[in-house]
Structures are given as C-alpha cells and as structure tokens.
Image (cartoon, rainbow, N blue to C red):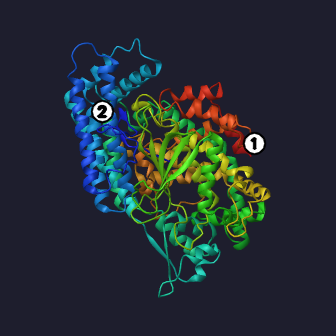
Amino acid sequence: MLMALMVAAAVTLSGGEGAAADNGSPFLQRMQTTAAFSATQNARLEHAQQLLEKLTAVKGKRTVENTLSLYDKLLTDLDAAGSQSGLIEQVHPDSAMRDAAEKFTQKVSAFGAELSLNRSVYEALVAIDISGADAVTKFYVEKSLRDYRLSGVDKDDATRARIKALRDELVLIGQDFSRNIRDDVRVVYANSAAELEGLPQDFIDRHTPEADGRIKLTINYPDAIPVFTYAKSEALRKRLYMEYFNRAFPKNVDVLNNLLAKRYELARLLGFDNYAAYVTSDKMVASEKNASTFIDRIADASEVRAKKEYLQVLSRKQKDDPAATLVNSWESGYYAELVRKAEYNFDAQSVRPYFQYDRVKQGVLDVMSTLFDVTFKRNTTAPVWDKSVECWEIFEHDSLLGRFYFDMHPRENKYNHAAQFNIKSGIAGKQIPEAALVCNFPGGIEGDPGLMEHNDVETFFHEFGHLLHSLFAGRQPWIGISGIQTEWDFVEAPSQLLEEWAWDASTLATFAKHYKTNEPIPAALVAQMKAADEFGKGLNVRQQMAYAKLSLSCYDRAPSEANLDVLNKTLREKYIPYPFVEGTHMYTSFGHLDGYSAIYYTYMWSLVIAKDFFTQFDQSHMLAPGMAKKYRDTVLAPGGSLPAAQLVRNFLGRDFNFDGWQKWLEQ
C-alpha cells in the first residue's frame, strides 16, 4: 500500500526541503522535539507563501525560469511539510508530536486547496512560453494545467470558496476516520492455554497467561492472522473475528457518511455526476463505468474457480461436522489451511522457521542489491522517531541515491497496517529522496525469534517495491513529477511485480534459513508452498472484487443511496460464498474508503499490468539483473514524467493485456 499526502486535487506532492537548502541530512535532524518540528514546518509554510507572492508579482513575459521554477519551489516547501507531517501523525510515540503533525497536515492541505483554486497562479502557468522547453517540462506544465482545471479553478468565486471549504473539511474528516481505526486496538482473551491449541509454539511462548489464567490477544495482525489460520478453537476464532471486523464501530459510521456527503457535493460542484466519476477521470481507467466493467470482468473470470474452492473448504469441514452445509467466515482461513495440508501436503507452519524477521530483512536488501546493482548501508547516527526504527541508505557505486526507514513492528498508537510513506522526494542535482516503510511484522521483542508467515514475506517485498519506486523515481528535474507521481491505478504495479521474488525458490534460498539449524529452505518445500497457495486464489480474487465494488459503490451514487450496511452485506453475498456475519461492520475499518475512495479496483488493475510485466523476466533465473535494469530505467526511474500507459509501452513494447493475469488465475 502506498500512503501519500493529497494536498489538493491539482497538487499531488512527494517531499522536499525548500525553506532551507537541502544538505542531505536525515529529515528529523532538526526536528526532534515538538517545538522544533513546528518551527520547521511553519518556516516552510511561510517560505511557500513568499514564493507564491513572488510568483504572482512577476511582470512581463512568463517563462520557465521566472514562473515554473518558483511554482516548483513552492511545491517543494508544501510537500516537505505535508509528507513529513503525514508520516509523523501516524507513527510517532509522543502524542504531542502526533497532534502537532495533524495540525500541520491540516494547514498544508488548506494551503494546497487554496493554491489549486488560485486563478492567478493558473493563468501564470497558462502564460508560460514552453515552445522551447524539453519534453519533460512540457508534460509537467500540461499535467499541472489539467489538474488545476479538475480542481475547479475555472469556477466562479462563490463556487471556488465552497470547494476550498469542502477540501478543508475533508482533511479533518479523513484524520478522524484514520485515528478511529488506529486507536481502536481491541482485546480478546483466550480463556485458557487450551484455547491456543493449534497455534505455533513461538506464538504461545510470547502470550503468557495473566493471573486469572486468561491470555490476552489483540486484533493486530501478528495476533489475528495466526488465530484465524491455526487456532482449533472455533469460539476463539469467532470472538476475535467479531472484534476484528468491528474496528472503529460505531464511531466511523457517522464519519463515513459525512465523508461521502462532502465528496459528493464536491464532485457536483466540479461538474461530475458523482465522486467516482470525478476521481476516475484522470486515471488509466478513465471513468467509473469502465472501473465497474473491469470489476465485473475480473469477478466473472474467477467465479467458477471460487465456487470449486468453496466446495473444497466445505468438504473439509464436513469431515469434522458431517451435518455442515456452509462454512462461516471465521472458519474460512482455518479450513482453507486444512485443505492445503490434506490436498497439497503443505502446512504453513512448516515454513515459518525459515522466515526469521532479521534474516528476511537482510535478504530483501540483498535481493534488491543484486537485481538493481545498488548497495544498502545502515545509518546508525540518523535520528529516528522510535528506538525500534532503523535508518538505511541506498548507494549506486559511491553515489548516495536516497534514504529510508524501517518501522516494522507493532506498538501502541502506531499505524496498524503496512504501507510506504513518502518523506521527501528527490530533485535531480538538488536533494535526495527519503521514504519510510511502516509495517506490523513479528519480531522486535527480546527472546522472540520473530518468525514470519510467508504472506508477511510477500508483503515485505510488496512494500519494498513502493520504496524502490520512490527512490529510483526521485531524480526528476521538477518535484511535481518526481517520485511516485503516475496515475493512481498504476502505482501498485511495481510493488505487485516484486512479490514474484517472494515465491522463487532460488531467491528464497539466499536468505530463508532455519533459525535453529541454518539450513536453507528446501526447494521442494517452496514448490509445495507455491502449489498450496494456488488454492484459494479464486476466492481471494472474488473477495478483492467485493472490496473494489464496495469502494466504487460508496461513491458512484448520491449519498442517500449509499447505505453502508446494505452495501456491505449485499456485495459480500454477491461475490463471496461465505455467509455474511450479522453484527459486523467491516467498512468502518476499511481505510481505503478515505485514501483510495472509489478506486480500490486499482489493486487488481495494477496486478493485471504486473503479471504482464512478469512475462518479460527469465523465470528460471530470477536474480538475473538484465531485465531488472530495463524495468528500472523504463518504468521506475521516469517517475511522473510520462503517462503510465507510455511507461507500460516503453517496457513491454505494446499496451498491456490480460494474458499473463489469466494464466496466473488458471495455474
């Protein structure tokens, strides 16, 4: 998942220093206290205002030098303040720092919204003589003007004022939504050690009974996923399921209804029928109707396989309960795992000893070093926001390309999913990019080996794909097109492509070694794991389409027609064979309903592209660097300097198709 601050519809930003010359130091070097953080961000906003005034005061002919350069420097200031505040409000252990960061996110967003509606700036950009400019600069200006028009800059004064007010409100609503999810870490108790039967021994070892014999579990991933997958106790799985799928309920019900209403009003003011039509208009998919058609195509393609897999899960449950006629959602992961054991001779717990967090981390770094001819070095002196956070730097030969941070284990008041956060985008010859991976993997506890599920390993590769995209793309001449600035329904393709290396036996053998014996993971075990993973693919695709349709359906109609409980239930029943569980409200913790809004389909859209990309690689020699270099040069490095469709054509030599994805589905 990619987390990026959307400052305004017309201004999607990715980092920078601006107010002070970038000396290459880590971003927190001058901001380790709340006062210092606030002073730095205030200085950036003040400098941005000065640049804005200077830009609008230019007399005479508008040029790249006297107008576009000032505009880009302004964005550099805004984005540094916005991106860093967006990260800190999600991860910092100090509530005062989080509160300060939230306020600056609001201020930056307000500045960005006003900027996107500033007709004087728009007219200045229109007036720039770009006849002699290079192709990248021309594209940047054209893209900026398009985004300004989408923001409503051409509306009358009253309409622009209302648009600005709505954008300011939406920032606050989104912060409430995210905070409610982040803060609602619910607790479930196992009544005794007997209820942990079936779970891995290291899981049991780190969950010691309390004085009354009960064992505390949370709904965070390191607890929830193993319980859903391995716990023999149906009662425990159900209790945890009910809490997991009621996160942020009921708080986020009103928050979401308000979010839908404000976004609908915004879309109507901008001349669109609904918010889904608005938000898809500048994506590869081009319209909400095309997005719906895409979802239907994927759902139809996976329907037969999903039904067959559900019957296999039901059949396995009937061995325990001959009278069973259905499989409940809290049983789905458990019985699917038993199918994999019985029919594919694979037990997911058998690979966990090979995936010790520290070794996986180093393994991912080593694999990327081999593929992309770069090196990674730990920076132990850089200030970090928590003692568990690590700072790393990426080099090409002796040249520093960028800096990144690993915040990889759960803790209180921290973002509780997995995502890459931008911190500062690079500008060629001026500043290096910085970014952070924020995950919630096992490990980080003294005495705990930190054994990961394989899907954790896959997530690590996925998020590192976003990270490399940020770092390699951070060398454009303009910050407005540097970093991950492609169409949003393309941004997941690079991360999904890198997941392929998490399934390659030769790649895994380089780092997946038993934490006790040091023996590399056997190729035969990887083959079993891969074969077993094919089971459930149809069900998983259908579930993703349920989420995608929910995301779209919340926004492709008037809010009065978007009953969240009805949509949640009817769409789940349409796409997923497991019966809907009454009393659950998954949508209140579906964070994508804010950040991605109507466009959750982008994950599958990007996957279709990623599977097509993968057909170009030598799948018998996954660590060969040749195709990886072409991929880096044609897809990652250009950042937002070209349309995504052109990036695809530059790598594939053609438009993308569904052939690779269809082959993957049918495996």
Q: Does residue 368 appear left or right of residue 594 in this picture?
A: right
Nearer-N-terminus badge (1/2): 2
Q: In which quarter of the view is residue 77 placed?
A: top left
Front-most of residues 583 and 434: 434
Q: Does residue 142 appear left or right of residue 208 in this picture?
A: left
At label 2, which amino acid type do we have?
Answer: Leu
At 38% from the left edge and 43% from the top edge, which residue is drawn?
5
Q: Does residue 200 appear left or right of residue 121 in this picture?
A: right
At 27% from the left edge and 30% from the top edge, which residue is drawn?
117
At label 1, which amino acid type do we have?
Answer: His
Front-most of residues 18 and 255: 18
Give the label on residue 621, or none. 1
Q: Residues within 10 Å of mark 1 (few under 14, many from 20)?
A: few
Asked if 123 appears above or below 174 in the picture, the reply is: above
Q: Does residue 142 appear left or right of residue 54 in this picture?
A: right
Question: Residue farthest to the right?
Answer: 524
Label 2: which residue? 74
- The reply to whether discs 1 and 2 touch (Cβ–Cβ < 8 Å) is no
At 65% from the left edge and 74% from the top edge, which residue is drawn?
198
Front-most of residues 39 and 223: 39
Is residue 308 something that shows in the picture? no
Number of dots carrying numbers: 2
Is disc 2 placed on a helix, strand or loop? Answer: helix
Residue 306 rendering spot, x and y as whole percentages: 67, 51
Residue 76 rendering spot, x and y as whole percentages: 34, 35
Asked if 261 appears above or below 100 in the picture, the reply is: above
At 59% from the left edge and 65% from the top edge, which residue is drawn?
328
Is residue 79 something that shows in the picture? yes
Residue 38 rendering spot, x and y as whole percentages: 26, 50
Is disc 1 placed on a helix, strand or loop? Answer: loop
Report the Cα–Cα distance between label 1 and label 2.
46 Å
